[in-house]
Amino acid sequence: MSYISPCFRFLFPAKKNKLTEFDLNYSSDVTIPASSAIINLPFSVTTPEVTTNTQSTYDNQGTTSKLIDQVILSKLNFAITGAGNFDFLKSIEIYLSAPNQAEILVASKYSIPETGLTQLDLDVSGDNLKEYIKESSYSLRVKAVTDKTIAQDINIHASEVFHVVAKLKNLFN
């Protein structure tokens, strides 16, 4: 076992972590409309814009938008908020868009089992989305294919978690 004297620690302090990591949590709601005609054909529904308000979070984490290295969608969960389940759904793709940014596929789920699920964790792409989250808002477009008719509107709450890696601003002043 080695011993490091306090004097040595003072002369050679441990390296200060130059990065901060944190999560940004957002949510949005989408309604898949009732329909008796759309089966095995893709259709799209867009969520209302989600305001990012990231600057206050960046300040609290000791960084700024200019020092963001990476933003990855780490989790996207869909939960049915009323009656129903995901048995009607064959596949789903989620696209992210933001002002001044092209739309990008960020999550999907294919071959969804008919087991009465009311929550669905989607497979995320792992793309770096820092330019999208730097914008003032974003929207999600849901592209779905159903394998059953939908007798009533299905209300879905989407929970998004973005993992951020950024440099600390006080180390770069």
Image (spheres, rainbow, N blue to C red):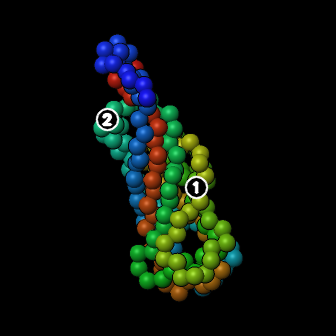
Estimate the spatial distance between the alpha carbons at disc 2 and disc 1, rounded to whole Å: 27 Å
Secondary structure category for the residue under label 1: strand
Residue 124 numbered mark, or none: 1
In this rendered view, identify the residue nearer to me: 132 or 25: 25
Using a 10 Å C-alpha cutoff, classify the residue at mark 2 as few (fewer than 14 neighbours), some (14 to 19) or many (20 or more): few
| Image coords of residue 40 (percent x, y) | 69, 76
**Residue at position x 52%, y 46% in the image:** 72
Badge 2 is on which residue?
59
- In this rendering, the answer to whether 163 lies above or below 65 is below
- To which quarter of the image does residue 136 belong? top left
Residue 167 left/right relative to 97: left
Residue 105 in sight in this render:
yes
Secondary structure category for the residue under label 2: helix
Residue 163 left/right relative to 13: right
**Residue at position x 43%, y 29% in the image:** 1
Residue type beneath disc 2: Asp
**Residue at position x 59%, y 59% in the image:** 123
| Image coords of residue 171 (percent x, y) | 38, 21
Residue type beneath disc 1: Val
